[in-house]
Amino acid sequence: MSGQASRWSAALVIVTATAACDNVEWGGAEVRLRHPPPAHVGAARDTTAAGEDPSTPELPAGPVLYIGSRDSTGVTLSPVGEILEDSIAPFRGEDEVPGYRAAFVRELLPVGTEFLLFAEGTRVGSFTSESVETDESFCVPRPAVRGIAEFLPEAMDHQRFLAVPREHAGGGRRAFEEPTPERDARDASLGLAAEIIPQVGAEWPGDLLNIRWDLQAFRPDAEGPPLFTVTYLFRDRLRVEPTVPSAYALFIMGVPRGGSFEQGYVWYREAAREGKGAPHFWEQFDWDGDGQTEVLLEVLGETGRWTAALDRRSGPWERVFQDPCGAAAPPVVASG
């Protein structure tokens, strides 16, 4: 991993012995990353202030899915929402349920809460909470949990994760693999976009390579060829920032079929009608335990980000969840 030494200069790195409990379970060494103590802990924003109503809002009764990322200071987890049978219940905002975030932290994220980390459809490590701040980058602010992370050595370069509380994780492990888009997938990503853009009535961008912002491969099953996802952004960038009314985003999932690829899922979003929303693949694993992997997308808007989820269920891929704040993003209008 480039810049590994500089990115981990603030982290304590310990290779644990095989006598550790996790290593007894699945063998090999793990690397532990301890997040450096924050200058201040933002928990004050997530605890009940004096004089507030002490009643506790209704909290998730089932397991909660978390989105995770790693940067130069360590690993951070933030809740996506409660895992339902075929969807996700979104994280509630303070304007909707006053005191919800504070109660969530108090009841569900005490110091020492343990999580399992997943990437590429398999378990890659564990995480123990140490402190909680508030992440304002989401369109609904939510807790940001920092702590100690342990990884399989082969997953040390991975930057994105999904997580669930340890007591709710199930299923077996498979070998960790990071597939990359092969030549046929790269070609198919352009071919499918060339078919879809006229179908949805979008403005032709000229050279598709100039607007292809994200191309990733993933293998939803233990065997078989990988799928790919690709994000095209016209007059826009894969960032949280304002855009223009003529911008659009096109997300495509390519599914292998008969030696080629066909449309597995398409999400076309015009800024002038639905607001900016640039979706891209984040991670995948079977978080609801139904035997079928699910995919989490990060969606970038004008002033914040949110999440969405794709699932096959028993048929084609479909979007089964999107944070309401993203679905209700205001249309982009011309300035001046």
Image: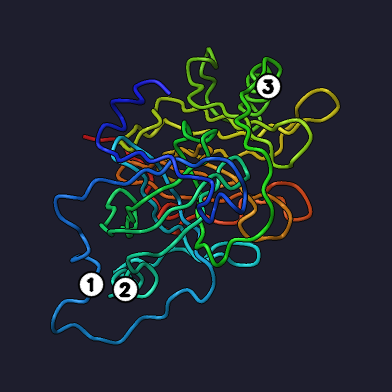
Residue under label 1, please give it. 47
How many labels sit on residues?
3
The amino acid beneath tag 2 is: Arg
Q: Determine crowd level at label 2: few under 14, some 14-19, many 20+ residues with C-alpha closer than 10 A.
A: some
On the image, the x and y values in percent for residue 16 come to 45, 44
What's the CA distance linking mark 2 and mark 3? Answer: 46 Å
Q: Which residue sits at x=42%, y=80%?
A: 58
The amino acid beneath tag 3 is: Ala
Q: Which mark is residue 106?
A: 2
On the image, the x and y values in percent for residue 285 come to 62, 48
Q: How is the image coloured?
A: rainbow
Mark positioned earlier in the residue sequence (1 or 2): 1
Label 3 residue SS:
helix
Task: Pick whichever, 34 or 87, lies toward us.
Answer: 34
Q: Which mark is residue 88?
A: none
Task: Pick whichever, 10 or 285, lies toward us.
Answer: 10
Q: Which residue sits at x=64%, y=31%?
A: 228
Mark positioned earlier in the residue sequence (3 or 1): 1
Label 2 residue SS:
helix
For the C terminus, which image quadrant?
A: top left
Mark positioned earlier in the residue sequence (2 or 3): 2
The reply to whether the C-beta atoms of the residues labelled 3 and 1 are less than 8 Å apart is no
Q: Which mark is residue 185?
A: 3
For the N terminus, which image quadrant?
A: top left
The reply to whether the C-beta atoms of the residues labelled 1 and 2 are less than 8 Å apart is yes
Label 1 residue SS:
loop
Foreground mark, 2 or 3, reads 2
